[in-house]
Image (cartoon, rainbow, N blue to C red):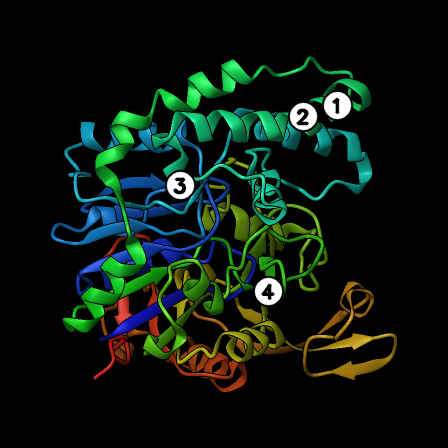
Amino acid sequence: MPAIVLIGAQWGDEGKGKATDALGAEADYVVKFNGGNNAGHTVVVDGEKYALHLLPSGILTPGCIPVIGNGVVIDLSVLFHEIDGLTARGIDCSKLLVSANAHLIPSYNRTLDKTVERFLGKRKIGTTGRGIGPTYADKMSRVGIRVQDLFDENILRQKIEGALDAKNHLLVKVFNRRAITVDEVFDELISYADKLRPMVADTPLTLTSALDRGEVVLFEGGQATLLDVDHGNYPFVTSSNATSGGACTGSGVPPTRIDRVIGVVKAYATRVGEGPFPTELHDEWGMRLRNVGGEFGTTTGRPRRCGWYDAPIARYTARINGVTDFVLTKLDVLTGIERIPVCVAYDVDGERHDEMPMTQTGFHHAQPIYEYFDGWSEDISAARTFEDLPKNAQAYVQALEAISGQRISAVGVGPSREQTVVRHSLLPA
């Protein structure tokens, strides 16, 4: 012990990478347990910016062992491109472990993802087009290709043939695209086998053994709670479980081993892709948050939709995940705003809701009910203790804590690793 789960508490892009990186200094293992290269973490270390997509943020911490768990779907070309890029910058990637049970993203799923999204037109989900959803669908349909299949050429070829039987009919007869051959998919995947083999491990056994030895294991979620396929704003969600429960199924570590769940929230709110967003701003305030906060996707470069802090969402996240601590990021972005609105409840067709509406229709029609808090004009980027913050900034943090369902244990005041105010230790005693 301990085992710590760190998840996004909004729609993603909350700054999980920085929080994981900060905790990674204390961790022996950092585990990515869901998603693929459809999301990214930006981490700034000693003035250097690193954009991570498939690799856990622990890859940047010397002595920490990064792990890609079985719940992740892996595009091997992206994985090795990312490894090569970090190696060229002097980052040691030799300790990376990859679960033998993780699923691979074959080229035909990237093609299908882009083709289907274009076909949907106005009904599109907002997918990144990287083959994530079709690969998770293959996993549930039991026609997926796993890491371990690369090491048995007969099984690999049989699985590709089985998958393409149906997918080529769809590509050719419905979407008027060319058929994909078994050989081209096989040749691409098998070309990575020798490079990948030294990284592959029985990661559930490795992680459980580490916990038995008393080592620290940190589970790093991709995406966020409101993008969870079961508990998010379905259907505008990702294809995996981004909540704390996903850390167990996506790593092979049981829930009885989890000591702490940390939820990361921005001091405002953002999301990418389609779907309802009650506090979204379509005016100059939305533009201000986007520009000052640098709200453009790490993976896609897409401008993020921006809005004010939403307390019902924070309370929902705390309840669904069993959050023990919140990390509040990007407080510095609000500097200079005279009065800061915070959504404390919703109006749904004339009825007040203090919690998230149960139905998709209710959430779609939710209108924010705001309370207003005095802002501050002082530069807070050099603050390192809570007392260093202006009184109004302290009051804002304390107000969010009171209405969000759990304590705020750390506050981000800038993008760098050291620009964090720690109020309570994030490690179990």
- 412 to 82, vertically: above or below: below
Q: Which of marks 3 and 1 is nearer the N terminus?
A: 3
Q: Earlier in the sequence, mark 3 or mark 4?
A: 3
Determine the CA span between mark 2 and mark 4. Answer: 48 Å
Q: In this view, does 96 lie to the left or right of 401?
A: left
Which quadrant of the structure image shows residue 367?
A: bottom right
At 13% across and 50% down in the image, what residue appears? 62
Determine the CA span between mark 1 and mark 2. Answer: 7 Å
Helix, strand or loop at label 4? It is: loop
Q: What residue type is labelled 2?
A: Asp
**Label 3 CA crowd tier, 10 Å (few <14, some 14–19, many 20+):** many
Find residue 165 and name its label. Answer: 2
Find residue 53 and name its label. Answer: 3
Determine the CA span between mark 3 and mark 1. Answer: 32 Å
Across and down, in percent, residue 152 comes to: 37, 30
Looking at the picture, tell me which residue is in the foreground, 420 or 180.
Answer: 180
